[in-house]
Amino acid sequence: MKKIASILSFCLMVLIPLRVYPQQASRVSFCFVGDLMQHGKQIHSARQPDGSYNYDTCFAFIKERLVQADFVGVNVETTFSGPPYTGYPSFSSPDELAFAIIKAGVNLLLTANNHILDKGIRGAVRTTTLYDSLGVLHCGTTNPWIIAERNGIKIAVLNYTYACNHHVSLGSFPINCSDTLLIRQHIQEVRAKKADCIICCMHWGVEYQLQPSGIQRSLTDWLCRAGVTAVIGSHPHVPQSIEIRKGPDGKIGFMTAYSLGNFISNQPEPFSRMGLLLSFDIVLTDTGPRIESPWYEWIWTWKPENQGKLSYYVLPVSDSRFYRSLVKDPSDTTEIVKTIKRLRNFMRETSPGIYERRRYPPYERKNLYFGNHPSCRPLWSGQPPVTPLKESFPPIEDYRKRRTD
């Protein structure tokens, strides 16, 4: 009898409807980083003795952060146009860079920026074809928008740029420009696809300026009124402020990160070497989508030199205990301390409502501790239809055949 009673008790526990218990709201976690750049010295650094290229070590210290999110987005400020590989001002990087960032956890690539046409239409098409062959989400050019779905939530991601450095004939290659008519059209399209929330990624602003421009702020207001939930900015190459707006219920209904700075680059200025990693959750409520648990962390492009050769790493530096165990050059440590102090003061004054994540995983407890080019101009004209590309190039292998989960 005791055995039967225990079996009945177990069955009751299993069969009780789940609605009896409080359930956690459906949510999707996002992580965004800034501009992925690839200057000539970075390409030289990645070259191996056998002539191949390897970038895996560049993201070894940040990978643990990236893999925690459902979707990780980065603005790819280079092309994958094939050899010869070149840095600034006309970027073309080895395919191995794309392999490395995807291996590190990035699964959302933003392609609408001023460098996508650095190698012309052929280079831009080869770049997006490579992304397709890897099975990775991308938007801003050949994909005007995407819908990323997880945990029953459909989130649309849109991407736009103020212009491109190299102009091509109108209609020869699809590029999302900061045209409010086009943005409104795309918003209507993703709404028709039942998107629950919209994230808009803007390539805008004035380079090397910490303060957002008036045009950035005006376009932010317009995007908020248009129903966008989050705006993620790139292009200034330095961090800018993060703006939080709460709804009547006290929850975060809208957020703008005006610029996340650089993810990795060879730009020498301290503010250009310091970027932001931004993380947040999208949660569906009775009153619509809300942003929960937003936080940011400082990342630094560390360039140690060994026997005359530079190496490049994305290094989390919010927790000094972590980077002090790695960075042995006192001048490097001093530079990090000075830069992060100035930027912390800037964020404290300009970005209330969002907090810096101070601890790196080895020091965290179960519950995280949160411590304290030209300017862009929105266009107002429609874009013509795109004509098919006539130029051909060698086929790209479908790398999805060799991917593992």
Image (spheres, rainbow, N blue to C red):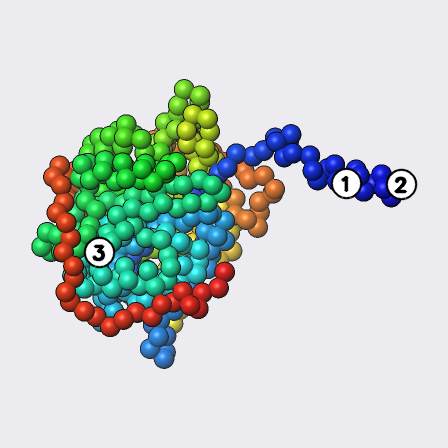
Which residue of the protein is positioned furthest toward the left in this rendering? 169
Q: Quadrant of residue 215?
A: top left
Question: Dot 2 corresponds to which residue?
Answer: 2
Q: In which quarter of the image is residue 42?
A: bottom left
Q: What residue type is labelled 1?
A: Phe
Answer with left or right where residue 153 lies relative to residue 13: left
Residue sitting at x 39%, y 28%: 253
Q: Are discs 1 and 3 less than 8 Å apart at CB?
A: no
Q: What amino acid does circle 2 point to?
A: Lys
- N-terminal of the two: label 2 or label 3? 2
Residue, x 22% and y 30% (percent of image)?
A: 218
Q: Which of marks 1 and 3 is nearer the N terminus?
A: 1
Dot 2 falls on a residue whose secondary structure is helix
Between 244 and 25, the residue placed more toward the observer is 25
Residue 10, label in figure: 1
Pointer 3 residue:
116
Q: Residue at x 61, y 42 (%)?
A: 366
